[in-house]
Amino acid sequence: MRNVSVLVQEAGESRERFLQPLWDLRLGYEDWLMSPLFPVLLSIVCYFGQCVPFMLIDMYCSHQKWYRKYKIQPEKEVTLPQIWDTLSLTFWNHVLFIMPASIAQWIWTPPTPLPELAPTLWEFVWQQAAALLIFDFQYTIWHITHHKIRFLYRHIHAVHHRYHCPFSWVTQYLHPWELIIIGFLTTTNTWFFNCHCLTIWSYMLLSITISVEDHIGFDFPLSTHRLTFGFFGGAPKHDMHHQKPLTNYQPFFNHLDVWFGTYCPPMSAGGVKSKALLDYERKHKETKKQA
């Protein structure tokens, strides 16, 4: 039996932890949450749960004024064949690659230990922020490499760039190798900090949410790039990457693109080009003429 003093200490600490009421919701569901399959199912449900509403918006609201007002490329239409194409690749990637990997994980990975205490709020926040920054750096390097090396672009990353006007299902419209790399980096980055499983699950959901938002093709008033005063790139920046593939390599933030000189000012809602974007295009057009 555990020492009584330890139990008393944990009880006192649990009352002091802001996230403890949320973490206590696990009680009675431990067998489900401990399963190695739980993070996989959580990710799949989160991804499809976020993509489906935007698919329905693209299908049934494209003639609404508000739709064109917030669409970044309002002249481009999301068609049923495009939705079918992206859904088909997503389905086969999950059947042929995600499912076998999940089964292997279920067989060989031990159950996830569930601590009695929730993480502190500080740990919960800074560890997710650090993991996002690490992934952002890792994928930026991978991304630049797969654009600069023609073989890698043509045979791997070009799949994702088949669509110049992103919509929600384009998020995981990926070559299997790219999907595997993204999944591996997202999963292992939390290992650096020995994160609490609640932090890990939240980080996975946060990564998926940001990734989907990057591809929805809308510039809404409450988008992440607006709420964070431009620290996040958001949908407009990544939308511009699909239009100008040699710019805006960074998936989440802006600082690396600014440092590397690959930042391109994005279009905003309604396809409006800012003065910064017009100056950028004029400058690069003049550079091409001189070359």
Image (cartoon, rainbow, N blue to C red):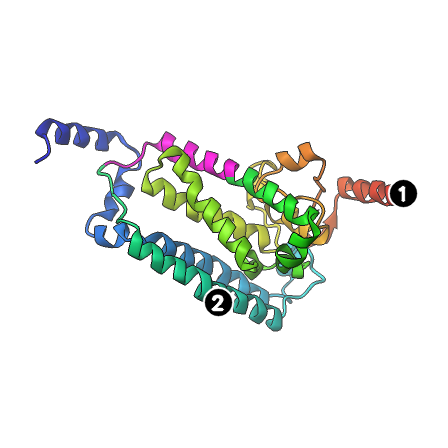
Quadrant for the N terminus in the image: top left
User: Would residue 213 be counted in the magenta stretch?
Assistant: no
Which residue is labeled 1 in the image?
291
Region of the chain picked out in magenta, as a range: 117-134
> Type of residue at label 1?
Ala
Give the side of residue 95 with respect to residue 20, left or right: right
Q: In this view, does 258 lie above or below 25?
A: above
Q: Residue furthest front?
A: 151
Marker disc for residue 159: none
Density class for disc 1 (Cα within 10 Å; few <14, some 14-19, many ≥20) is few
Closer to us: 42 or 76: 42
Magenta part, dominant SS: helix
Give the side of residue 126 with respect to residue 272, left or right: left
Mark 1 vs mark 2, CA separation in Å: 45 Å
Which residue is labeled 2 in the image?
91
Give the side of residue 103 with respect to residue 240, left or right: left
Closer to us: 61 or 153: 153
Closer to us: 142 or 43: 142
Q: Quadrant of residue 142?
A: top right
Residue 176 in the image: x percent, y percent?
A: 53, 59
Q: Which of marks 1 and 2 is nearer the N terminus?
A: 2
Q: Is residue 171 above or below residue 8?
A: below
